[in-house]
């Protein structure tokens, strides 16, 4: 799927409106990281991946995406709906009983676009490696993409997977780290300092791409394009993407406190006033 950069920038505004409206409606959800990763999802689904809305779990002949930090489901659901995987009106059911749009993505209800249940942090890279190996085995030249939170890197399973991918030259895997420096309990440097993320992955045999401005859509598109160019050369690729938690809504930035808190009525109106309605609300 392709769209002009300006159209995609307009889409980021609408996706952000979807995010704050979804979490407000049920007074539950994770707006901070969702807002911070909006440019990533728009870039991935509108400019980077080869993917089909005629969804099947095998994904033969198309790029695959696995969301590991599943709590940022609002942005995931929004881009899937806005890309045609399901009707945008279904966003009204977010986190409601019997909805396909649970707080953390699940597979048992068959939501198009979602290939794994995620939310138990640290597992997405391992699953993605399996998918990447399957593509190699079946001579499928498409890529596997993942997204992880930087706080998620405190999970040991991530580093087992990273070591395996590097040692086994899983070079059709591109993993992006949302390096916003914040997690549920505070700043990552205070909870458990991550050190130099890029250097750590490089030591495990990965190619490293840096996106210093992860809330600039063109920078994200360019960074992911560079990652694709580095794929297929015997190493997995990691993208270290610097973002701002809560980006696009001024009172949600500069703090970890909007990691998992919904805006009240007044805060919602404030947020929406900062986000132009470009494509129509659901």
Image (tube, rainbow, N blue to C red):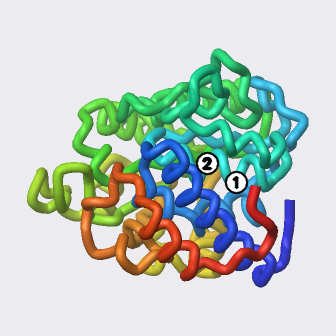
Q: Residues within 10 Å of mark 2 (few under 14, many from 20)?
A: many
Residue 175 seen by the camera:
no
Q: Is residue 114 above or below residue 92?
A: above
Percent from the top left, x then y, of residue 44? Answer: 68, 59
Residue 99 point in image, percent of width and height: 64, 27
262 with respect to 12 (left or right)? left
Residue farthest to the front?
265
Is residue 144 placed above or below 9 in the rendered structure?
above
* SS at mark 1 in the image: helix
Badge number at residue 211: none
Among all residues in the image, which is located at the extreme left? 190
Residue in the image at 48% along x and 31% along y: 118
Element carrying mark 2: helix
Please state, as top left, top right, bottom left or bottom right, where the C terminus lies in the image: bottom right
Tell me if I can see residue 192 in this picture: yes
Cα separation between marks 2 and 1: 5 Å
Q: Which residue is mark 1?
A: 79
- Asked if the residue at tag 1 contacts the one at tag 2, i.e. Cβ–Cβ closer than 8 Å, the answer is yes
Residue at horizontal 62 percent and vertical 65 percent from the top: 17
Residue 268, given in percent of the width and then of the height, sits at 49, 66
**Drawn side of residue 161 relative to residue 191, left or right:** right
Q: Is residue 172 left or right of residue 176?
A: right
Residue located 50% across and 50% down the image:
23
Q: Is 92 in front, or is 59?
A: 92
Q: Nearer the viewer, residue 49 or 183?
A: 183
Residue labelled with disc 2: 76
Given residues 138 and 254, the one toward you in this image is 254
């Amino acid at each position: 799927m392709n769209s002009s950069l300006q159209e995609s920038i307009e889409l980021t505004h609408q996706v952000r409106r979807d995010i704050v409206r979804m979490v407000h409606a049920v007074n539950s959800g994770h707006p901070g990281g969702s807002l911070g990763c909006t440019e990533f999802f728009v870039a991935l689904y509108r400019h980077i991946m080869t993917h089909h809305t005629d969804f099947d779990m095998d994904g033969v002949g198309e790029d695959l995406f696995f969301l590991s930090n599943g709590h940022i489901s609002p942005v995931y659901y929004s881009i899937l709906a806005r890309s045609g995987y399901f009707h945008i009106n279904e966003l009204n059911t977010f986190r409601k009983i019997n909805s396909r749009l649970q707080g953390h993505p699940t597979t048992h209800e068959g939501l198009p676009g979602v290939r794994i249940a995620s939310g138990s942090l640290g597992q997405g890279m391992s699953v993605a490696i399996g998918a990447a190996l399957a593509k190699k085995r079946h001579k499928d030249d498409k890529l596997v993409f993942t997204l992880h939170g930087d706080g998620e890197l405190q999970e040991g399973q991530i580093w087992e997977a990273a070591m395996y991918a590097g040692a086994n030259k899983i070079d059709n895997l591109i993993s992006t780290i949302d390096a916003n420096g914040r997690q549920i309990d505070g700043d990552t440097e205070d909870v458990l300092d991550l050190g130099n993320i890029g250097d750590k992955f490089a030591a495990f045999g990965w190619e490293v791409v840096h996106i210093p401005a992860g809330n600039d859509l063109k920078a994200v598109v360019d960074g992911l394009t560079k990652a694709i160019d580095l794929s297929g050369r015997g190493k997995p690729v990691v993208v270290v993407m610097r973002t701002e938690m809560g980006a696009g809504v001024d009172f949600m930035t500069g703090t970890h406190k909007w990691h998992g808190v919904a805006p009240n009525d007044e805060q919602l109106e404030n947020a929406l006033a900062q986000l132009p309605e470009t494509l129509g609300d659901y």
